[in-house]
Amino acid sequence: MEHLRRELAKHTQIALDSSIFIYHFEANPTYLPLTEVILTTIADGSCQGILSTVSIMEVTVWPWKQNRGDVARQYELLLANFPNLTIMDVSRDVARKAAQLRALYNVRPADALLVATGLIAGATAWVSNDTQLRRLTSELEIFVLDDWLTKT
């Protein structure tokens, strides 16, 4: 796990996929050790985390489906107050960059918006568990959680 921390800390800013927080909030037993390292690395200031407002939708949809607005609001509050995490709105620049990413790499709309948010913010790494996004390696360094399960 220390190796992951060192690799992430090489970046000033890292963009996060919604799945990182979903796994963490749900205490996913497979990924929780990794999300703890990732989020601790951000919280302690070793690097800055970047998150899109689109992630608020993705992280809170399940609690809303379960009629648990209290949990959805708690998740949003945790995101809003997470140390060294910037939540960015989808701006025109982000939308334009997302369109370019979709055109070049054929990524899904939500993924394009999430990654574009990070790129516009200056992130040099993307942390996700979506292997489809490996095709973006010419844009930024890609960290896929499943790859790190075997490295620990």
Image (tube, rainbow, N blue to C red):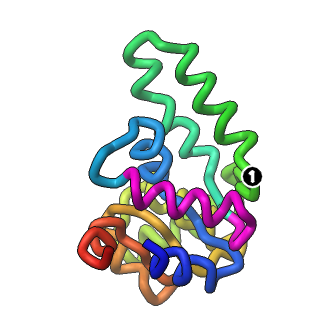
Around disc 1, counting alpha carbons within 10 Å, would you say few (fewer than 14), some (14 to 19), or many (20 or more)? some
Q: Which residues are magenta?
A: 32-48
Q: Report the predominant secondary structure element of the magenta stretch.
A: helix
137 versus 97 height, above or below: below
Return the residue nearer the eye: 147 or 118.
Answer: 147
Horizontal arrangement in the rendering, residue 23 relative to residue 56 (left or right): left
Q: Is residue 32 visible?
A: yes
Q: Please name the residue shown 46% across and 56% down the image.
A: 35
In depth, the one of 109 and 18 nearer the eye is 18
Identified at 58% across, 31% down, the residue is 75
- As for residue 24 lying within the magenta part, the answer is no
Q: Is residue 133 left or right of residue 40?
A: left
Residue 10: image location, x then y, percent: 62, 85
Q: Position of residue 70 (x, y in %)?
A: 57, 14
For the residue labelled by badge 1, is the local secondary structure a helix, a strand or a loop?
loop
Whether residue 96 can be seen here: no
Assess whether residue 35 is covered by the magenta stretch: yes
Residue 142 appears in which quarter of the rendering? bottom left
Which residue is label 1 attached to? 83
